[in-house]
Amino acid sequence: MNDDNRHDEQATGASRRDFIKLAAGSMGGAILAGAAIGCGGSGATLGGGGGGLVGGPGKAPPLPSGFAFFSVYSPGDNPLPSIYGLAGGITVNDGSLMFNGVEVADQGPRAVYSMDVSYNGTSMPDVGSGSTLLRTGDQGPGFIVAKIYNSAMNNAGALSSDCHIVSAQNDSPLVLLNAQGTGLEPFLANLVEGPKGVTFGGHYTDVDINDNGDLLVTADYSTSNVSVPPNFNSFPVAQATIAQGLFIFPGAANTVDPTQATLLQSTGSNMPGTNTPISRMGLIALDNNQNYVCQVFGNDQTGSRSGIGQQRMTAGIVAGNARTRAHMLSTSPTIGGRAVAGVLGDTYMGPRITNAVTLVCVNTSPTTTELCYTANGTTTTLAKTGGTSPTGALINNCGNGVVDDSGLAYYILVTPNGTELVVSNGVQQKTILKTGDSIPNVNGKTVYSIVQGAHSTQTDSAGRFSFVVDFNDGSQSIVVGIPTS
Amino acid sequence: MANIAKTELGTTDPLDICFGYDMIQGFSIDVGYEKNGTIFSVSIDLLVVKLEASATWAMFVGMCGPRYAINVFVEGNTTNTSGGSSLALAASNDGMDAGMLFGIEITFTIGCTIANADFHWVWDGWHSHISRSWNNLVNVQFNAAIDLFSILITVIQKALDDNEGVLFKQVTNVIPNLGQAYGFFATSKDNFSTGPYAQAEPILTLPINIVPFLEETPLAPIYALDESLQVIWGGFAVGPQIGLGTPVKVQMKSIAVGSATYTNISNSDGNISGTSSSAADAHPTTMAIDFEHTTGFVLTGGLFGQIWALKIFSVGASINWDLLGIFGIQVNAGPYDNTSTNTIGQNLQSPGAAMASNRKKVKFVLEPETVLA
């Protein structure tokens, strides 16, 4: 470590008592009492923000009364003994876990793995076979996998599909699709023809797939047209559009047809309800009703207009349904046009959406975040920097979390004591695991940090959720949390 | 009546766009253009991560064109008529290139620091406390310049594979301050030999992440940054957003043989005819063709940059240049006229001879800096 880049900061008010609390016993499997949301954030609710989305929980789902936590896999264990370390990215469905890992050493080959898991109520799950879905160095038709970026997997039983963005060796990135488990094949790549004159380019930022096999991708693309009419008095015409688009491919897991797509958002178009063009798009999420959320970046012109002479990058979230109009779920306060109803700020973290419930972590300043939960058109602040966690700890920062099918949000809070994993229904919240806790089937170790929210689908249809835990001895495990009621 | 020996008319032989006719008259680009700015710049705390990232660019673009180069061999005769004279020519071995020469050198200045918070207990009796330190996962700072097309020429050629007759290749650089120039043009043959018009339809679009191509270039640190971000399963992407199209269509508007100018030109399968109110010269020594063309021209440019890690965070932006505005181009489709004159029986001069007799000046355009902060 470079000392020049290491700056110790004494946590405000931290004391031996904090350490005792940090080192306290297990909460795994405990029965938990809920706390009102006001404890964690401002408790503020804001109207609007839900228009245009299809579905929704109707009312707040009840908080589970408790959770059973089980370590189901550690690097080196069967059925995947070659894994050296877990990266933290994990996606789940009802029968398997898909996760990122590295082999041999930190700089070793990287891969995406799949591991079968079957559940027995709230007892220890059974771990089945494991497989390497994708590995650096793998060769496919015309490409060698150099790097692996974002992945997604849906929940369709034996016909589940997964997709991945990879960088090809000495060639442009591409999207691989394992349609209904038939094997990974290139789906999108540079020069692949898309819908209505679209030619896909050589960059893809993020990908998601829902349980119906609909695929959502942020992809660079171009359209071009050149014609020279036979009559000399008619002039030649050339047209070229180079942009990044948010594309939905309905039923892509069935059709495997990149021309069957709809362009939902595009750079150059204004953010919905504003007069600020989209400059770039980032992370995305898609639910089973084709509701989507997407990071959109813009160049705020306020500075230029006011004579300051500078533009400022903004980061917001657009939400919508593939068949209806979209709206801004969060924007920078300086964005022009009709303002958004949600919390104002820049959103650099990946947004989440499940069953029309959204979770967005907004940077209200460069050093403060606020986690916004929107259900049925109402936005609630679940937590924010400077607030208190359900355990009463000062919140340093919030994670972007995930939302399950019922509308429960699971997210990480960073406190002076470490990390807390919290569940909320938008009205109440509970800390269900935190630094210093134990996992019942892991002996002699305590939780050091909880790595959750690196992927958007970390819960299954039964509300079970998975994440990575770093223990106090430096070891890691994939932990499954099962609601006990 | 006079026989006209086989004569070559047009620009140069072999064809060379730099010595061709301007597609848009008044817009003769032999130009160097410099500009710089910021793609993105952020300093934010996310969960247990402190992210500081910035990407700036400086660009030098050199261009020559858009132009078209054309040549055609004609031979035949003139015949006096009651009202003047008529012309009958056969066209053969004609060719046309249309497009432009250009190069882009881009200097990227990249800074990226990602530090994660580490919490640790400091033993100090009753004053013991928890401290937080920041440990750098990624720390990359550098700048370097690159000839953009040198790393993408294979990709571009692949992109143009299905675009018959459209070429992208290294050419002799006539643009000062530019390391290497490239020709982007459509080439076609036997237009006037078979019909009334010569035409070419080049178009190129280029939205691509160049990072995978940088491993063995001066921008290898960008490749390394992308590699280092793999520690957190992230990536860094940067690339051009270029759109270029230069379709052009040409016809022979009039042909002069000696002192007689023939109009009402028609061309059927390479058999060219025209009429003049003047009598035909008995022994003409020169010949001229007035080529008339119309064009559609499009030129867009920009850069994008993006940094991300799994589905945890992402920052990105793009910069779009109004290249037509920068160069003060107001696209007018024409029609425009250019006249080629030659001694009957002679071939056209070569590009080298044309260069010696027609030194071109290169102008530079400097734009004020804009910043995204």
Image: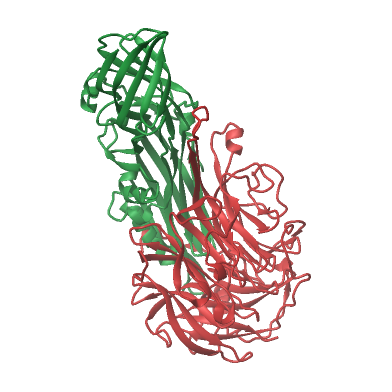
Chain colours: A red, B green
Query: Where is residue A203 drawn, in percent x and y?
Result: 45, 55
Q: Is residue B114 visible?
A: yes
Residue B81 picture quarter: top left
The residue at the point 67 percent across, 44 percent down is: A274
Q: Nearer the viewer, residue B132 or B372?
A: B372
Along the horizontal axis of the image, is A402 left or right of A149? right
Left or right, B3 with reference to B156: left
User: Where residue B9 sits in the image (x, y, percent)?
Assistant: 29, 23
Judge left or right: residue A125 versus residue B232: right
Q: Position of residue A365 (x, y in %)?
A: 59, 52
Q: Residue A429: which quarter of the image?
A: bottom right
- The residue located at (70%, 65%) in the rendering is A356
The residue closer to the viewer here, A23 or B31, is B31
Picture coordinates of residue B134 (x, y %)? Answer: 45, 62
The quadrant of the image that shows the N terminus of chain B is: top left
Against A441, residue A341 (above or below) is: above
Please determine whether, in this image, residue A329 is positioned above or below residue A28.
above
Of residues B148 and B76, which is closer to you in this image? B76
Seen from the viewer's position, the closer of residues A457 and A257 is: A257
Looking at the image, residue A435 sits to the left or right of residue A332; the answer is left
Q: From this view, report whether residue A154 is shown above or below residue A374.
A: below
> Does residue A7 appear in this view?
no
